Amino acid sequence: MKKINTVVIIYFFIGLPISLFAMFFHFSDLFFSMAGKGGFWGWLNGFVGVTFGLWILSIFYLVIALLFSTHFREELVARMMWLKQRDEREVISAGAAAKKTFFMTVALISFLLVVSLLHFQIAKIPDDQVKADGHHHILKMGLGLSIWNSPNSAQTPVDPNLTFDFQMPLSTTGILLLILVWELGTFRWYLKGALGTEAE
Amino acid sequence: MNLKDKKIKIQSRLHVLRAEKRLTQENLADAIGVTRGTIVAIEKGNYNPTLELAFKLSLYFETDIQDIFFLEGKRNEKN
């Protein structure tokens, strides 16, 4: 069981950048058109696809193991920092890093929440409706307060007068991935800072 | 005496005791079951060990804890 834990954790960290690549580029039309030509791009397509699929499977294991296996949690910290928590200072440092990471993650999630609520639009005012002040554009700001995805939102017709439309550009998957990478990155950063300062 | 807001800086003579016994940081770390980084941190004053580790060090060097650790500016004169 311990060997499986180690293999899954190593694969999770190796597969993470490849999976990020897959999400950013692999599922794009450009990549698919290049992969269709075979050769290196075809091989890369297959490699990234298989790696991404296995990475998703590793996450299923990771979720269960993080909840129920103390050894897995310890192993995860050890692999993240090449740190075995061999003595009290390393345990205390890991705790302090976890505390700082918690607050950084709360800050990120709060920021993402605000961005996801905001909706900015700049629309052109039709010439026949321009008022005496002479303004040709109008700024609209809104707050989207719905928690559930509306199945009809995609069918809303696009206003042809819109010149700028900003709302949360990241998908749910993108947001969750960002939080995951942020959390792992900040924990590693703080732990390295706490332990690295004592090096001779 | 109100010590609520008093900042306390603990210093150690660990490097002196270690030198007297001609021990490397690695030797000492192995002997008491910590990493070399922890010994380095204690000697530099960057880490205050727990009471358990402090007692381990005092047992190892066969001396009192006060002879290893002391408040800044209040070192025991007998040392």
Image (cartoon, helix red, strand yellow):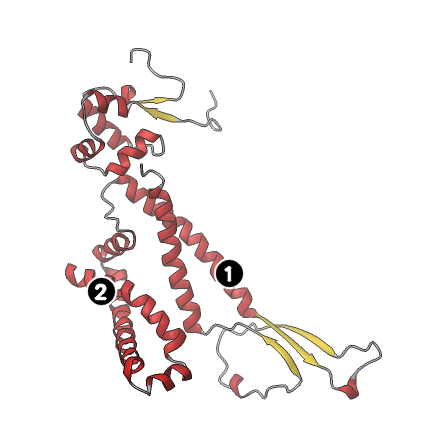
Closest to the observer: A187 or B18?
B18
Query: Against B70, is A4 above or below?
Result: below
Closest to the observer: A46 or B75?
A46
The local secondary structure at tag 1 comes to helix
Query: Against A78, is A92 above or below?
Result: above
Closest to the observer: B51 or A11?
A11
Q: In the current view of this chain or complex, which residue is farthest to the right? A: A132
Residue drawn at (18%, 24%), measured in percent from left and top? Answer: B22
Query: Residue A108: x percent and y percent?
Result: 48, 59
Residue drawn at (22%, 37%), measured in percent from left and top? Answer: B34
Q: Which mark is residue A154?
A: none
Residue drawn at (33%, 11%), measured in percent from left and top? Answer: B77
Q: Which of marks 2 and 1 is nearer the N terminus?
A: 2
Query: Residue A119: x percent and y percent?
Result: 60, 73
Q: Name the residue under label 1.
A: A110
- Name the amino acid, label 1: Ser
Closest to the observer: A98 or A170?
A170
Q: Residue A8 carries which label?
A: 2
Q: Which chain carries label 2?
A: A
The answer for how far apart the CA atoms under marks 2 and 1 are is: 31 Å
Query: Residue A152: x percent and y percent?
Result: 52, 86
Label tally? 2
Q: In this view, does B7 lie to the left or right of A197?
A: right
- Name the amino acid, label 2: Val
Please identify, in this view, whether the residue under mark 2 or under mark 1 is nearer the observer. 2
The local secondary structure at tag 2 comes to helix
Q: Which chain carries label 1?
A: A
